Amino acid sequence: MGRIRRLVLDTLKPHEPSIIALADQLSELEGVSAVNISIYEMDRKVENAKITIEGEHISYPGVFELIEELGGAIHSIDEVVAGKMIIDDAVTLQD
Amino acid sequence: MSPLWGALQRIREYDNLANIGEIARRYFAMNAFDGVLTIIGVLMGNMTAGVDEPKIVVSTGLATCIAMGVSGLWGAYLTEAAERKRDLGELSRYTLTDLDDTRIGRASRAAVVTVALVDGLSPFLAALIALTPFFVVGIFSTIIWAYYASLGMALLILFGLGLFLGRISRENLILYGLKTVVAGVISILISFLLGE
């Protein structure tokens, strides 16, 4: 089975638990090495957060379950990197 | 991670999510204050009516304690549950997900139970402690000393509550203590004058 090494998620979450708690708990999941969360939009009750997770073997169901358990919703999966190493999308002439 | 540490972490997390500590603190101070003033009323009523049978004071006092406890428990449970349900529903509409079975939902339910318990137990225990001299009435030469001891105990609890509030507001503890004691003294004086 292939290994997911990077996930970029667009999520909507309540203000509490804070992104500090969310990052802390995501980073404790097995196979996760690092987590980056940034807020790009703030509403009265909720906020939109971009979550970037990197690791050796990320379990998407585990990530999904934890975000949902903490009251968040995944709007979209914006980037996935899987395999033996991390690669970024290749620059093409059209870019 | 030991189970105890895990439980403590969970309590801390629920407290952060549902703001349990602050609300419970407010209910505790408010209702313990109510409980003490009510028992002062019961004691003064019995004293000015000339009740010299400790059993009557204990039974009216205990009945009052129980009624206050049940009232606090019931009232706070229903009020808090309604408010929390509304908040959770509103948040669910924003996130477009059902939050009942999430940590937020569980923290919200834990908050309802905790606040209801604090709301029920604080007036019950505060009043019960003020009543303790009547449980050991044999050590007093006459029942009037049991009344004085009970009223003194009630004022002491009020002073303690004042210290607690002073600590929360980070202001002068003694001043806060005196402010709460004054409420008790006024209540005693008015009851005394009415009884006369």
Image (cartoon, coloured by chain):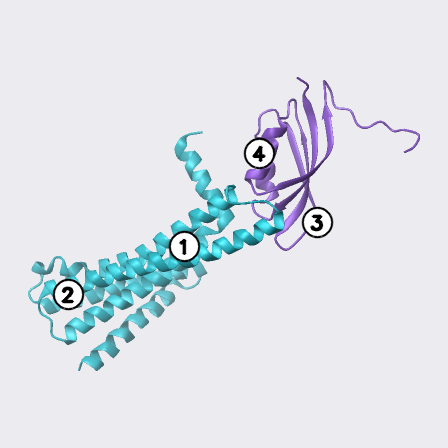
Q: Is residue A85 above or below residue A24?
A: above
For image coordinates 78% across by 24% down, the residue present is A87
Q: Which amino acid does label 4 sit on?
A: Glu
* Callout 3 and callout 1 share a chain: no
Q: Of residues B78 and B115, which is closer to you in this image?
A: B78
Q: What residue type is labelled 1?
A: Ala
Going from the N terminus, do you reach mark 4 or mark 3 first?
A: 3
Residue marked by disc 3: A41
CA–CA distance between discs 1 and 2? 31 Å
For image coordinates 19% across by 69% down, the residue present is B43
> In the visual, does B82 lie left or right of A2?
left
* Callout 4 and callout 2 share a chain: no
SS of the residue under disc 2: helix
SS of the residue under disc 1: helix
**Dot 4 alpha-carbon crowd within 10 angstroms: few under 14, some 14 to 19, many 20 or more:** some
Colour seen for chain A = purple
Q: Check if mark 1's residue and mark 2's residue have beta carbons within 8 Å.
A: no
> In the visual, does A85 lie left or right of B19?
right
The chain assigned the colour cyan in the figure is: B
